[in-house]
Amino acid sequence: MRTTACKLFGGKFLIQPWEEIAAFVVSLFAMVLIASGYFFEKKSVYLFCQAAGIVGISLSYFFTKEFFAMIGLGIGLVRTLVFYGFEKRDKPAPIYLASIFASLSLLAYLIVNVGVLHSAKPVDLLCLAALILYAFIFRIRDMKKVRYLALIPTALSIAYNLLVQATVFVVLSYAFEFASCLVSIFKRKEKNE
């Protein structure tokens, strides 16, 4: 049985075997959704796939007791749905919205990890940086730029999950997303040549 550190509730949360399995299953679901989004031309379909995948990854973090990552992705889900609404109306999302979502991610980190759980770790900065980058990248309407820029926070997410020893499938989900993004970039290049 794995544990995750936290000064609240006696110092550690136990992660039960069924929670590991549940995290694995929802991560698999999320991986397929997120990765498939990169192959669509319409930004609204991409955002829909991202939103559905975020739900799965958030549940996986819930099962493995990585609460900041879970809450950060919850904010990311709201952000994605808001940007989806702008995309469906064929309008750009204002930059101030990206700034608000980035600020909410930082605020959530300070409240959850520093204030409540007292479990702030330097490695959390990787997750925080990824969430902030996603906030600004998702407002970009040009899918070509999104594909290239999304590689950065996805790589940070892979590093974070490896360092916090997230379940294998969460790490694989982000790795698969990274690979899908690369494949979609090369596929588009071939199409244009």
Image: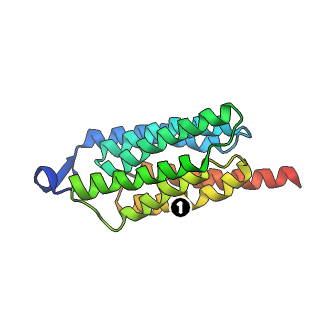
**Mark 1 Cα shell of 10 Å, populated few (<14), some (14-19), many (≥20):** some
Spot occupied by residue 148 in the image (x, y as percentages of width and height): 67, 58
Residue at 41% across / 58% down in the picture?
Answer: 161
100 horizontally vs 17: left or right: right
**How many numbered badges does the structure rendering display?**
1
User: Where in the figure is residue 29, as x and y percent of width and height?
Assistant: 49, 37
What amino acid is at disc 1?
Ala
Q: Where's the C terminus, which quadrant?
A: bottom right
19 vs 12, nearest the viewer: 12
Q: Is residue 52 left or right of residue 43?
A: left
In the displayed image of the protein, which residue is found farthest to the right?
193
Location of residue 89 in the rendering, given as x and y in whole percent from the top left corner: 68, 31
Q: Which residue is mark 1?
A: 155
Visible residue check, residue 164: yes
Helix, strand or loop at mark 1:
helix
Q: Residue at point 48% right, 48% down?
A: 101
What is the x, y in percent for residue 21? 34, 40
- Please, which colouring scheme is shown? rainbow
Q: Which residue occupies the foreground of this view, 131 or 166? A: 131
In the rendered image, the residue lying farthest to the bottom is 122
Q: Is residue 173 left or right of residue 46?
A: left
| Side (left or right) of 132 relative to 188 | left
